[in-house]
Image: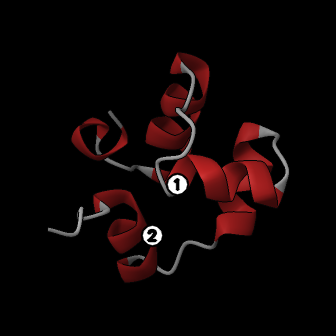
Amino acid sequence: MEEVNNLLGYLKAHHISQAQVASIINRSISATNRKINNHSEFTRSEIHKLHYELNIPLEILI
């Protein structure tokens, strides 16, 4: 069964680019892509920034 990526769906639905996310968390686009695609985890600081700057619900980020 394929895992659903809620964050990727949220970003697409709200027209938020991976480049925007990368800029906010101060990471490269490739590092951000790995985080978005669940190959690496977001830090607490990154989660905080994305929640407050892009209004992404915490349930999606955690």
Count of labels in the image: 2
Classify 10 Å Cα crowding around label 1: few (below 14), some (14-19), many (20 and above): many
Q: Is residue 50 left or right of residue 34?
A: left
Tell which of 13 and 3 is nearer to you: 3
Residue beneath the point at 81% across and 43% down: 27
Q: Secondary structure at mark 1?
A: helix
Question: Which residue is tagged 1?
Answer: 36
Q: Is residue 21 left or right of residue 23?
A: left
Q: Is residue 55 left or right of residue 62?
A: right
Classify 10 Å Cα crowding around label 2: few (below 14), some (14-19), many (20 and above): some
Tell which of 55 and 11 is nearer to you: 11
Q: Amino acid at mark 1?
A: Ile
Residue beneath the point at 22% across and 69% down: 2
Quarter-wise, where is residue 4 in the image? bottom left
* Tag 1 and tag 2, C-beta contact below 8 Å: yes
Task: State how far apart marks 1 and 2 are (Cα).
Answer: 10 Å
Quarter-wise, where is residue 11 in the image? bottom left
Question: Which residue is tagged 2?
Answer: 11
Instruction: From the top left corner, tell me how far across and down residue 42 is, in percent.
Output: 54, 32
Q: Is residue 13 above or below residue 43?
A: below
1 vs 2, front mark: 1
Residue farthest toward the left in the current orientation of the protein: 1
Instruction: From the top left corner, tell me how far across and down residue 49 is, in percent.
Output: 58, 33
Query: Which numbered disc flags the more N-terminal residue, 1 or 2?
Result: 2
Q: Amino acid at mark 2?
A: Leu
Residue farthest toward the front in the current orientation of the protein: 1
Q: Is residue 52 above or below residue 2?
A: above
Quarter-wise, where is residue 30 in the image? bottom right
Instruction: From the top left corner, tell me how far across and down residue 35 is, in percent.
Output: 57, 46
Instruction: From the top left corner, tell me how far across and down residue 57 is, in percent.
Output: 29, 45
